[in-house]
Image: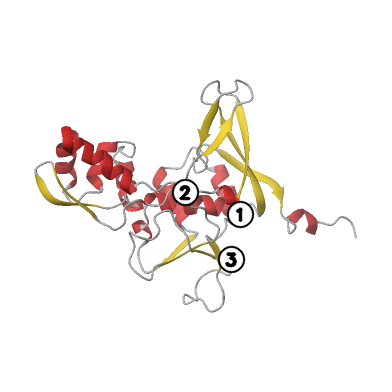
Amino acid sequence: MSNDSTMTPVTASTENRNLPSTAVTVTGLPSMGKAYPDGVEIHYQPYTFGEVKSFSQSQGKMTMSKRIDQILSGIHIVGMEKDELTFFDFIYISLLRRLTTMNAIEFTLSVGCPNCGAPVRHQFSWEGLVFDDLPAPKLPIIVDICGRQDVKFMPLTLGQYKTLSRLGLEEDEVAIAAMTSSIEFKEAQTLFHGALGEDAALLGEIDKLLFHDLKPAQATCKACDTPFLAALDDEASIITPFRKSDSAAGSRIRFGD
């Protein structure tokens, strides 16, 4: 599914009158809103000049939690707390904030080749933002697993990710599964770590049913001719404007009297 209808400008009739005039309404999300209460509205705004400078100056010095909070400052939600966003929806919206800030139609993704390390440039447009819909038809997912009945699973939320990050477990698949289950975290960690046979297969299937990230772009390294998938939402990659829109700031600059 592409995000053709992802961005709709917020009009004066918007229910939340406190939104910035630059706010954009998100009408399409990787999660399809399945994890949220009815009536939730999500809006975001481009980065300000000051925010861009702040991010640039603090590169490599900011904790993950602080970085998330800075990104969240430009995301406005009506109907639930920001930490209730699924982690993948948050990553997607944070990318939209970056792209909207550039005021461009097309973009260049610059990444390192995983084979030889050479820099690779890949061009894409808004239509290139394609994501996997959340496969689970309804939430929560309910299973009997590891000797427990009716265990419920939901997508990883941003708040849960922040907790895992503070524990240094944000990349630990067992910890992620435990955090997203209805079983107490430490107990679930122990149960899932020792899962065997059908239980292990079930955990893998649940992970697939909750996955809803952006699809990576197909790129090819010119230096070694290696094809690979480049993640558009990877903070390590650099995205810059490829062709400015007609309203680019350069057309408004004048010199002399």
Q: Estimate how packed mark 1 is, as few (under 14), some (14 to 19) or many (20 or more) residues with alpha carbons within 10 Å.
A: some
Q: Is residue 40 left or right of residue 112?
A: left
Q: Looking at the image, is mark 3 or mark 2 earlier in the sequence?
A: 3
- Is residue 231 shown above or below 77? above
Q: Earlier in the sequence, mark 2 or mark 1?
A: 1
| Outermost residue toward the bottom in this view | 13
* Residue 146 visible at all: yes
- Amino acid type at circle 2 is Phe
Q: In whole angstroms, how far apart are the C-alphas of marks 3 and 2?
A: 25 Å
**Residue position marked by numbered label 3 in the rendering:** 22
| Residue 87 left/right relative to 220 | left
Q: From what the image shows, is residue 54 above or below residue 221?
A: below
Q: List x then y, in percent, for residue 218.
A: 55, 36
Q: Would residue 195 be seen by someone viewing this image from the given angle? A: no
Q: Badge 3, how many Cα within 10 Å: few under 14, some, many 20+?
A: few
Task: Locate residue 195, reporting x and y percent.
Answer: 16, 35
The residue identified by callout 2 is 131
